[in-house]
Structures are given as C-alpha cells and as structure tokens.
Amino acid sequence: MKNFENLFAAYLLVWAILFVYHLTVGARVSKLQQEIDRLKELLKQ
Amino acid sequence: MNFARTNWPAVLGAAALIGVAGYAALFIAPEERTMGAIQRIFYFHVPCAWTAFSAFFVVFVCNIVYLVRRDLKWDWIGVSAAEVGLAFCTAVLVTGPIWARPVWGIWWTWDARLTSTFVLWLMYVSYLLLRTLLPDTEKRARISAAFGIFAFLDVPLVYFSIWLWRTQHPQPVIGGGGSLDPTMRWVLLLCWSALLSVMILMVRQRYRLERMRHEAEELAHAVEERAR
Amino acid sequence: MTIIRAAGIVLSKELRLEFRSRELLTTTVVFVLMVIVLFSFSFDPTSEESRRFGPGLLWIAFLFAGSLMLNPSFAREQSNDTLHALRLAPVEPFAILLGKILANFAFLLLMEFLLLPIFAVLYNVAMLPVLGRLVLVLLLGTLGLAVTGTAFSAISAQARMRELLLPLLLLPVLTPILIASVECTSGLLADPPELRMNWMNVLIAFDIIFLAVSYLLCETLLEE
C-alpha cells in the first residue's frame, strides 16, 4: 500500500488526541475525588 | 484512577466497535486508485467531523434547555459535549494536513470544508474561553448558553459562505468529491458509529467530572460556613 | 410606550453620551487610519493590486475597529450599575437592546463614511461611480456587525478581560459578514462593476437571523 506510514501516523494521532483528553479528564476526576473526601472529613468533625 | 465506576459493558462494546471499524477501514474498504493507502484517512477524517458536529449539536440543545429550565445539569452536559466536540474537531484539523501532504505536496489548502472546520474550532475555543472568564456559576451557565446559541446558528452560514467563496476561487479539495461506492458508504457509517460511541463515553466521563466539581464547591462552602 | 419609541430614547441617550466627549469616535477613526497606512506597506498599491486586496483590508480594518468600538456599549453600564436602572423602566427589554444596536450601528457607519474617501484616495480606488450600491453594502454589512457586536458586548461585559474577549468571540462568528461584504465590495470595484446578489443575500440572511436571535435572547443578555 502506498503511503502507509502517513496513514498510520494519522490513525495514531487521532487516537492519541482522544486518549490524551481522556487521561486529563481522568486525572482531574481522581484529584477532585480526593478533594471531596477531604472536605467531607472536615465537615464530619 | 478509580475503575469501580467504569461501565465495563459500554467500554468493551465501544472498543469492539472501534476494532471492527478500524479493520473495515484498513482492509475491507476498496483501495482507491490514485491516492493509495492514505485515502483511508477519509474513514476517520470525515466521521470525526460528523462526530464533532453531533457533539456541538448536543451543546446547542443543552444551551436552549438550560435557558428554559435553569437546571445546572444541562450546563454540565453542555460543557462536556463542547470539550469532547473540540477534541474531535482538533482531530479533523490534524488529519486534513496529514492527508494533504502526500497527495498534494502542501500541508494546508484553504479547502472549503477544512477552513469552515477551522472557524468552527475557533468558535468553540472561544466558548470554552468565555466560560473560564466567568467565575460565577449561574452567570457562566447563562452567558455561555447565549453565546453558544448564537455560535451554533452561525455555523450553517459560515459553511455556506466559505463554500460559495471557494467555488469562485477554487483550490484542491480535501475529502474528494464524487459518488460513493456502497462498500465505502457502510464502512464510513461504521466508523462514525464507533466514534459516536467513544464520544458518548467521553461526554459521560466529563459530565461526571463537572458534577463532582460542583459537589466539591458546595462542600467547600459548607466548610466555610461552619468555620464562621 | 412602544418598542420603537423606547429604543429611540435609548438611542438618543447613547448618541448624546458619545457626542459629549467624542473620544470613542476619534480614537476609532485614528485606529482605522493607522491600519490602512500600515497595510499599505504589505503590498504595492497600484490600481490593479488595490482592487484585489483593497476590499479585504478595508473590511478587516472595519471589523477590528468595530470590535474595539463595541466594548463600551455595555462596559460603560457596569460602573454605576446603570443597566439595572434601565431595566427597571417600564419598557420592553428588547427596546434597550435595540436602542444600543442602533447607536452602535450609527457610530460604525459614521466611522466608515469618514474613512471611505480616505481609503479611496490613498489606494487609488474609483468609488464614485458605484457609491450608491457601495453604501448599500456598507449598510447591510455594518448592521450585521452592530447586531452581533452589541449582543456579544452584553455577553463579554459580564466576564473578565472583556476588551480582549470581545474580538475573540466576535471575529469567528462574523466570518460570513466578512466574506460576503468583501465579495460584494470587490464586485462593485471590478470592471465592469456588478452587485453580486448571491452575496447580498448572505448579508441579508445573517442580519435577519442574528436580529431574530437577539430578540429571542434579549432578556437573557440583559439579565444580571
């Protein structure tokens, strides 16, 4: 197949963009969960 | 990362769909005569654009419903769909040049669809930027909803005027015109459904984040109140 | 009080306010003049080149100047909370918005009419034979700019960094206006001059749609 490397690069980039976005959201979710737990602890006192 | 709340059937289903769609795009779809393998980008470039549009349409609906009902939940869905839509829009703008380079030798042509998508991208970047500059929750939801409605209704005008302009000053067209082989058509739709499923999963995850943000804010206020 | 009368009162207030100091008008005119001069360095202003690049640069100058000029429309109201006072008046909210739209429309047109002859002279463009039709294009394009700009001024006035935000919000959305106005202007400056109706229709469609949406969203835009 002609130009296969470019095709591969394109597919890789599309999924990389989506995956990076997914990871950043995931990281923020984890951080927030910690924050919520901490605040809940504070309230209980 | 917390995997307890992951909806595994949905994720695995989406992964399977992606696998099938990818295989179809790479091996089942017929080979295009002039461009070679690179033409298969089409099976991702075009559905990414359609997925971005679908996401932005969701934003539009959420904007309207929020202004009518004033339930913050709609604002959360809206911003989630806007961010996910922007990610897919970025993918369109990145795959365009990757396609153009081996075929026409240049990175960017002011092709009608690509240019319009660029303007679309700029509009939704502005939408998200506007939100970061509005710290108050209610104001942010209301004001960005108003802008979102203007922006979405502008999209057909943008696409039409750029298309009309390009027909008078022609340039190489990315995406190829002409009729579609039936096999190509169903591979295209298959890829679109794969990307749509990814979009839905990402919007749900982002929505969860937004809801948690709100919860954290409320808890912080409660702690503050108690401290007084 | 009918919408028209109320809008007229708001309009006269805005006009009087501006003409007392005229600072907005003068600053904007000088700005566009500078843009026109600076652009001249980027290409050779022979008659042929001017006809090709002139309309584009003219409208870009107008759009940039407009997005600067439209800021104070609602930003001004913030300092003494005058918008709140306006809203208490027993008039339709759309009258307030319409009054501001008309005021901005007037200011923008004034700026453009002042700069058009200067542009024609500096760039060797023959505008007199097509002046009537050119004014029509200016009216339609500027109306789109005024309607969208006023609505977005209301939007950005509530946010931080509003001076930078307004052009950011406005320019992508105004793409159809820019393209259509430039095409119409190019058509009129071409040889022989023609009024490109398909592009005029784009301008008209944009104006109608955005005016309608402004009407539907006016309460939201004016809320605090």
Image (cartoon, coloured by chain):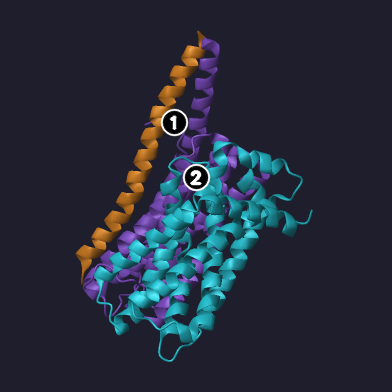
Chain colours: A orange, B purple, C cyan
Three-letter amino acid code at the position of disc 1? Ala
The image quadrant where one finds the C terminus of chain B is top right
Q: Work out whether residue A39 or residue B5 is closer to the camera in this orientation and state it.
A: A39
- Residue C58 percent across, percent down from the top left: 40, 70
Where is mark 2, residue-wise? B79
Q: Secondary structure at mark 2?
A: helix
- Residue A28 percent across, percent down from the top left: 39, 33
**Crowd band around label 2 with a 10 angstrom C-alpha radius: few (<14), some (14–19), many (20+):** many
Q: Is residue B129 visible?
A: yes
Q: Residue furthest top?
A: A45
At horizontal 61% and vertical 65% (from top left) the residue drawn is C209
In the displayed structure, B4 sits above or below A3; it is: above
- Residue C84 percent across, percent down from the top left: 65, 39
**Would residue B45 be found to the left or right of residue C137 on screen?**
left
Residue B4's tag is 1
The image quadrant where one finds the N terminus of chain B is top left
Q: Quadrant of residue B37?
A: bottom left
Label 1 chain ID: B
Label 2 chain ID: B
Q: Work out whether residue C9 or residue C136 is closer to the camera in this orientation and state it.
A: C9
At horizontal 37% and vertical 64% (from top left) the residue drawn is C33
Q: Work out whether residue C122 or residue C4 is closer to the camera in this orientation and state it.
A: C122
Residue B17's tag is none
